Image: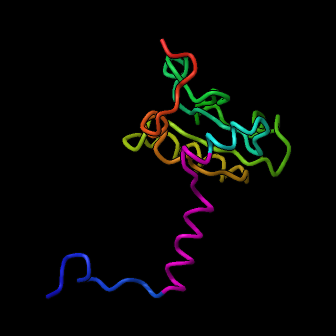
Amino acid sequence: MTSLVTETPAAQSEDAAAHFARRLSLETDCWDVHESLKSGAPDFVLFDVRGPAAYARGHVPGALSLPHGKMTERRMAEWPEGTLFVVYCAGPHCNGADRAALRLARLRRPVKLMIGGVTGWIDEGFALEGES
């Protein structure tokens, strides 16, 4: 008997490997960001792309506030070419991080999305900075 899980056959191993490698090239998660920030020398710049009021209420420690609408070629010139940017927003119900990632990619800047956003960060048990 076929279940809903096996009704569609799994991808070939090579296809699955390519798919998941591609996803990891575009995304990172809250745990990996936390561990990198904890090292004290992260090799990326972390942007909270929500509005300034949401950022002030609580953000990932070390994140800079830069809403996607403020990401211009001139503003991004503050960082050297090749700098990796990691972006996040409120959580899976918000597409602000996708918009920011798209904008950065169109500016030819390396970018990854922190999946889960603030919601994921809190779900992992990590504290926010600036919480009121």
In depth, the one of 45 and 61 nearer the eye is: 61
Read off the magenta span.
13-32
In depth, the one of 34 and 111 nearer the eye is: 34
Vertical placement of 21 versus 24: above or below? Answer: below
Residue at the top extreme of this rendering = 132
In depth, the one of 80 and 4 nearer the eye is: 4
Taken as a whole, is the magenta stretch helix, strand or loop? Answer: helix
Q: Position of residue 74 (x, y in %)?
A: 78, 35
Residue 77 left/right relative to 130 = right
Q: Quadrant of residue 123?
A: top left
Vertical placement of 110 versus 128: above or below? Answer: below
Q: Position of residue 16 (x, y in %)?
A: 49, 79
In depth, the one of 72 and 79 nearer the eye is: 79
Query: Is 26 colored magenta in this rendering?
Result: yes
Residue at 41% x, 40% y is: 94
Q: Position of residue 4 (x, y in %)?
A: 20, 76
Residue 8 left/right relative to 59 = left
Residue at 66% x, 52% y is: 106
Residue at 64% x, 44% y is: 86
* Residue 81 visible somewhere in the drawing: yes
